[in-house]
Image: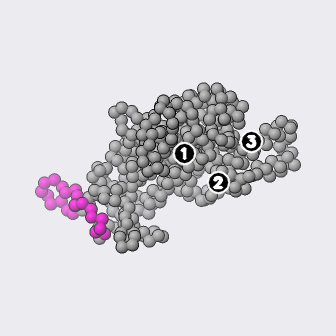
Amino acid sequence: MEVIVETILVSMSNVKKHQRNFMLSLLAVLVVFQGKATFKNMSRYSPINEKRFRRWSHRDFDYSEFNMKLIALALPKQADKIAAIDASFISKSGSKTEGLGWYYNGSAGEAQRGLEISTICITDLQSNTAYALDSHQTIDIEGATRVEQYAQHVIDVAANLHALNIQYLAADAYYSKVKFVSKVLETGIHLVGKLRVDAHLQWLYEGEYTGIGRPKKFDGKIDFEDLERFEYAGILDDQVTIYTTVAYSKSLKRNIRVVMLSWYKGKKTGRALLYSTDVQLAAMTLIKYYKARFQIEFLFRDAKQYTGLTHCQSLRKKAINMQVNASLTALNLLKIEDRQEKSTSEVTVISIASWKRRKFNQHLMDRLFDALGLDISCKKVSMIYEQYSNYGAIAS
């Protein structure tokens, strides 16, 4: 892991030697610490003292560029992958923290007082695994809505998305707003999302021009109970029937590819509407892209549990952004190391708990062997090192 990190840091021209050394230590400590990833506790597992952690937490670092280079090293450029965006709630006590406000907490099902981070990730469709690209704290700005801020986040990282050959961005129903969709399309990236089940969509008029007046564009509002005008696209394993069409969305103010999933729930019919701004996108591919969006939720879960996503005690937004991005980047490194160790690009189970235990064991043995003057290249020492690296791990 250290070799990959150092290689990428050396390739970043704006990262000088002192910051490079700090980032190496920071990312190393985030995969071995026990307890909480506070500045004081991280100093216990690192040669860097608490004061230095605090000081460097306010320095700028381009995590988006770092993760872009990291993902480019791990995933082939031709690999089938998409981007996804979502926000996560972070509870925070006190009243002086920058960005403190009321945000929706999905686990509680209501708005609560705390912090929010907006994250953009890259999902590898072959392995069905997400890697964080960039994250920043949501700060309310006068004259700009939160949706506009999320759109600006996409614009800020668009160059790195294009460098990774990303053409589609998946988002949940909250982002299906014209202010967000229009801004994203300006970057050259298409959106895949979800609509309300009662969305106002209109059929496109396909008849001939009568020669009188303005040409007719639309042919009435879509009735989702009338399936004759939809194109049948197939059926999923769980007996969900797929219908598709190209329609005009009144709320998004543009033509979109609509995919309707229909199923029977008792005597009632269930329905879900997905869409893409790319009207040429196949229905089944659209569904696959939207399902892959959910992998971003595992990023939030694992980073909160294992790499200190929510542990920053600073009141300043720069320090919070540093902690959030460093936590997600450390998680990326563990996932990529798992991928390299297994030598596979297929779907596989990744136990971050096991990797965290393994890294801690290796960190402790490195300190002990160094203090005892033992050479790890020695065959007997190497065997012990390998044996006890997995001590206490869930999956050896």
Where residue 132 is drawn, which disc sits there?
Answer: 1
Q: Nearer the viewer, residue 107 or 15?
A: 107
Q: Which residues are magenta?
A: 207-227
Does label 1 or label 2 sit earlier along the sequence?
1
Compared to 262, does 172 lie above or below?
Answer: above
Q: Which element is circle 2 on?
A: loop
Does label 1 or label 3 sit earlier along the sequence?
1
Does label 3 or label 2 sit earlier along the sequence?
2
Any magenta on residue 275? no
Quadrant of res 220? bottom left
Where residue 378 is drawn, which disc sits there?
Answer: none
Q: Which residue is pictured at 59% across the width and 34% down the height? A: 12
Where residue 351 is drawn, which disc sits there?
Answer: 2
Q: Main secondary structure of the magenta part?
A: loop
Q: Amino acid at mark 3?
A: His
Decide: marks 1, 2 in contact (CB < 8 A)? no
In percent of width and height, residue 77 lies at 55, 50
Q: Which residue is mark 3?
A: 363
Q: Which element is circle 1 on?
A: strand
Quarter of the rendering occupied by the N terminus: top right
Q: Which residue is pictured at 82% across the width and 37% down the height? A: 370
Compared to 64, does 250 lie above or below?
Answer: below
Structural crowding at the residue carrying mark 1, measured as other residues with C-alpha within 10 Å and reported as few (<14), some (14–19) or many (≥20): many
Q: Would you say residue 320 is visible in this rendering?
A: yes
> Which label sits in the foreground, 1 or 3?
3
Whole-angstrom CA distance, mark 3 to mark 2, is 18 Å
Relative to 81, is 148 on the left or the right?
A: left
